[in-house]
Image: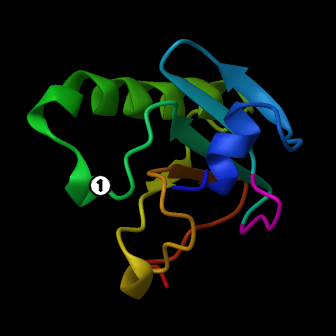
Amino acid sequence: MSKTLFEKIIDREIPGDIIHEDEHCIAFRDINPGAPMHVLVVPRKPIPKLVDATPEDQQLLGHLMLTCSKIAEQEGHGDAFRVAINNGAGAGQSVFHLHLHVLGGRAMKWPPG
């Protein structure tokens, strides 16, 4: 099976504007931002979609959420940001490697999309 775009960024095969990394995940700026701050938080473990996560991934999923908060704070948007996960093509997912969008720096509307 071929690597996803995100696996290639994690493996440094293609460039990414990386702003955070640790043993569990990596975070980089989205190349097509939907807000002044638009960062993707991606687990190193390749999980195609959120529904593919297992009970063993519970700690990893919590780590990803806490990382989103850290990034929003680091980027100056710690008190107003949105986290979004698209699950499947019908929900707008285009790279099938779980990732969390961290958006901030502009007013967010509800409902989204």
**Where is residue 18 drawn, in percent x and y?**
80, 32
Q: Amino acid at mark 1?
A: Leu
Q: Is residue 113 left or right of residue 15?
A: left
- Residue shown at 59%/14% (left/top)? 22
To which quarter of the image does residue 88 belong?
A: bottom left
Q: Main secondary structure of the magenta part?
A: loop
**Where is residue 17 drawn, in percent x and y?**
86, 39
Q: Is residue 68 left or right of residue 64?
A: right
Q: Is residue 75 left or right of residue 97?
A: right
| Rendered view: 103 above or below 87 | above
**Where is residue 106 drawn, in percent x and y?**
70, 62
Is residue 31 inside the magenta stretch? yes
Residue 19 in sight here: yes
- Residue shown at 56%/65% (left/top)? 95
Residue 111 in sight here: no
- Residue shown at 51%/76% (left/top)? 109
Of residues 94 and 8, the one drawn nearer to the viewer in this rendering: 8
Range shown magenta: 30-34
Question: Which color scheme did the rendering employ for the protein?
Answer: rainbow
Of residues 104 and 23, the one drawn nearer to the viewer in this rendering: 23
| Rendered view: 87 above or below 63 | below
| Rendered view: 69 above or below 99 | above
Of residues 32 and 7, the one drawn nearer to the viewer in this rendering: 7
Is residue 76 inside the magenta stretch? no
Number of other residues with Cα within 10 Å of mark 1, as a class: few under 14, some 14 to 19, many 20 or more: some
Number of numbered callouts drawn: 1
Write down the residue under mark 1.
50
Element at label 1: helix
